Image: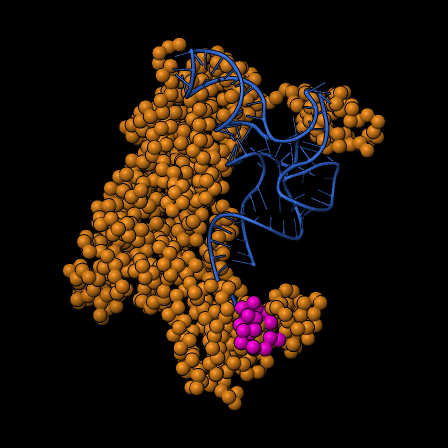
Amino acid sequence: MAQETQVGYVPAAVEERWQRLWEERGTNAFTREELRDAEDPFYNLMVLPYPSAEGLHVGNIYAFTGADVHGRYQRLRGRTVFEPIGFDAFGIHSENFALKIGTHPMDLIPSNVRNFTRQLRRIGGMFDWNHVVDTTDPSYYKWTQWLFLKLFDAGLAERKEAPVNWCPSCMTVLANEQVIGGECERCGTPVEQRRIAQWFFKITRYAQRLLDNIEELDWSETTKKAQSNWIGRSTGAQLRFPVVDEEGVETGDVIEVYTTRPDTVFGATYMVLSPEHPLVEAVTDDGLRAPVYAYVDKAARKDLVARQKADKTKTGVPTGGYCRNPATGERIPVWVADYVLMEYGTGAIMAVPGHDTRDFEFATEFGLPIPRVVAGPDDDAETPLEEPYLGPGRLVNSGDFDGTDVSESVEKVTAWAAEQGWGEAKVNFRLHDWCISRQRYWGPPIPIVHCASCGPVGVPEDQLPVVLPRVEDFKPDDSGVSPLARVEAWYRTECPKCGAEARRETDVSDTFLDSGWYFIRYPSADFDDRAFDPEITKKWLPVDTYIGGNEHAVLHLLYSRFLTMVLKDLGHVDFEEPYDVFRAHGLIIADGSKMSKSKGNVIVPDPIIEEYGADTFRTYLMFLGPFEEGGDYRPAGIQGPFGFLHRLYDTVVSAGDGAADPDVERKVHQTIRQVTEQIPALGYNTSIAALMECLNVVRSGGRSAARAEVEPLVVMVAPFAPHLAEELWERLGHEGSIFDRANWPDFDPAKAAEDTVEIAVQVNGKLRATVVASKDASEAEVVAAARAEENVQRHLDGKQERRVIHVPGRLVNFVVG
RNA sequence: GCCGGGGUGGCGGAACGGUAGACGCGGCGGACUCAAAAUCCGCUGUCCGAGAGGGCGUGCGGGUUCGAUUCCCGCCCCCGGCACCA
């Protein structure tokens, strides 16, 4: 054996060499002209990472590798694949970390980005380093501010004082989406309510459209479902209950409620206002002001965790005020209770204790009457209610509507209410407007100037970007305003409209705005004079495939859809859905649970890559389990792919010139069929298994391979182990990168066809033998051969044969009895 | 509670309604070696049996079918998301 082949596969050397060659040759990078003129473009997107100080974690690498495999496959099929990467480096996460270690984020982030860049190169991603986006770079956030102004000009950005979620630890406002179970998603501190003037994007105007389009999207079902639920459309009616005094005379005030069951209005025996409801004061009887105000006060101070515990016992106080139920004409009491939320519907409800779980609990707690207005199949109007009845049936105790089936009662009662003028059908959404203000330092300043006479004025486009000043003291405080409000030299300016002395907006914007449009920026990242170039955008967008985690289902994916729709409506782009295909990958876990520092099961990737190489690590991650379901990381398992790639290397390097063996060639073509089917469907683990199986056949009995047998294997392994594939491709005598041409092997059905098949022989569905038959043997021949088997004979012996099932090429089943 | 996704050897995981456990890890045995590592070859669901072979096996209970991990009905458990949303 020659000296050099004894050395064998040295991943570090191979990978170092090819990463250098890719860089030198610009294998994965595009110039502006190349992007403009690209044929058959394929935009392969993955979620841009937040560049933490810890560096890339296994989850990042898993996600990026899975996406990269997809991109590399498309490229080997001949597509021109644009695969950009960037850094989402603004936000509380970076800022808090910077505070913790006492480094300015403007110093910290560049060093993190450098580290991430090194790691991303090291794992062999097919990234175009000419089109990197860094959200903290003024050349990027200039256009984030531009985007804000577009929404502002269109009336879709609005500043209003509103109760907001305030995290007392992070000292900032949080979007509803960032509050998890009443706690700050970042630090777990219970969130409080505050009233602060905030900027909102009116995403609710797009709620119906955002929901309607979901049906048409080729996205993972899980993601679509999560997003639909988040938008949370419900249909019902808005009903008006006049407030009345002791004599039943209307006071002029009206309590408006939203309900999904207007048909149960005859069973509404009391009303509930949320503690924040504006009518609380007007409705409350003078004699009850003290307890009512005490309750309202307590609710306001109560943190949202306690408020949102669904299983707690209901609390509330009577106001002494009354409404008239417009259906029954009866006078019903008005209560205040914190189980009614101001943020949803109208902040007031009609309580129907007989047919709503929460109202039932409340009525039970306070001894209020619980009449029945819906009777199930086994009930009549008088059947007592032991629990709220939510099922099907017909209306009872409901005046003229008695007997109406609940399937049509909502519609009928709503129509009646409309006719009488006290209600109408109404659609409600769970989705709220998007609060984008952050009273923090580390974000793009919102490009607005507040002028005493002109109000809020947008910064003119030629004055963008509004550069975030370097401020040494960027620690937030409890004042509710951004640290930028302490920098007078920065915020003092003049009104762009009238020239009067004015003050800059000192809030910065939510990071989700940064990441809400980055994919549009990527192909145009090298343009300084426009957010995105129309021609290039037309060529490359929308994104062909987006692969990312399901944690983005309701935040990033919803916001970026919204922003894209707005850009479409304003005439800036000609599509309204940003991602044709979205696939959610699974989660890598370790020892059966999510990796976390506290559990101490975090896998640090760098040493593994150093020991085994990026190709082995990539292949192992993709081999762990189905990509869309994730998998359990087991350190020992990496030996499998490691050995596989070594054997592949040895086999290819020592392959001879001879013709392919027909049996081996058959296996190779069967593998081509399988892998070609499975890679685009993200069936990575089974593709790798098929490649391993094929290599085992190529090497079976210690035979040495022919080049024609292994060349297709080299190409098919390339998406997973790109460096090794390049090296072997070169060894096979090819010039240039394997990814430069459509090198994916063609499947030839004739070469894959077997001429004999193994047929399972069953007796009463139990396997008793197998027979080998020619692939075009007749049924009679196969059945005869099956019957001739000794073991089959034994089981047929002495029994009545009732039926013979023959599945061509598969099995014969004798049914006896 | 609601909405997703799951439950298959010692482990990660494969299986168009048609031979359950591909591929890999680990384990056992062997080759090479003075020895070890690396590498290579063989075996490896479980029980009974010397063997041939047979029984049992895909969370549980039913059903459809010649045949069910796969389809249907009813449960249990795990993971993720939402949750006093009227």
The answer to which image quadrant residue A41 occupies is top left
What x and y, as percent, mark residue A315? 48, 72
Above or below — where is A445 with respect to A410? above
Above or below — where is B34 with respect to A403? above
**What colouring method underlies this structural image?**
by chain
Q: Main secondary structure of the magenta part?
A: helix
Above or below — where is B10 with respect to A755? below
How many marks do you count on the picture? Answer: 0
Quadrant containing the N terminus of chain A in the rendered view: top left
Quadrant containing the C terminus of chain A in the rendered view: top right
Q: Nearer the viewer, residue A660 or B27?
A: B27
Q: Nearer the viewer, residue A72 or B20?
A: B20
Q: Nearer the viewer, residue A141 or B76?
A: B76
Tell me the magenta residue range: A354-371
Is residue A40 among what the camera can see?
no
What x and y, as percent, mark residue A469? 19, 54
| Residue occupying image coordinates x 46% and y 40% | A591
Is residue A604 among what the camera can see?
yes
| Residue occupying image coordinates x 54% and y 81% | A332
| Residue occupying image coordinates x 75% and y 29% | A763
What x and y, as percent, mark residue A791? 75, 23
The answer to which image quadrant residue A387 occupies is bottom right
Q: Is residue A361 magenta?
A: yes
Point out the residue furthest to the left here: A489
Q: Is residue A754 magenta?
A: no
Q: Which chain is blue?
A: B
Q: Nearer the viewer, residue A56 or A206?
A: A56
**In this rendering, would A139 be left or right of A669?**
left
Colour of chain A in the image: orange
What x and y, as percent, mark residue A587? 45, 43
Point out the residue furthest to the top here: A1
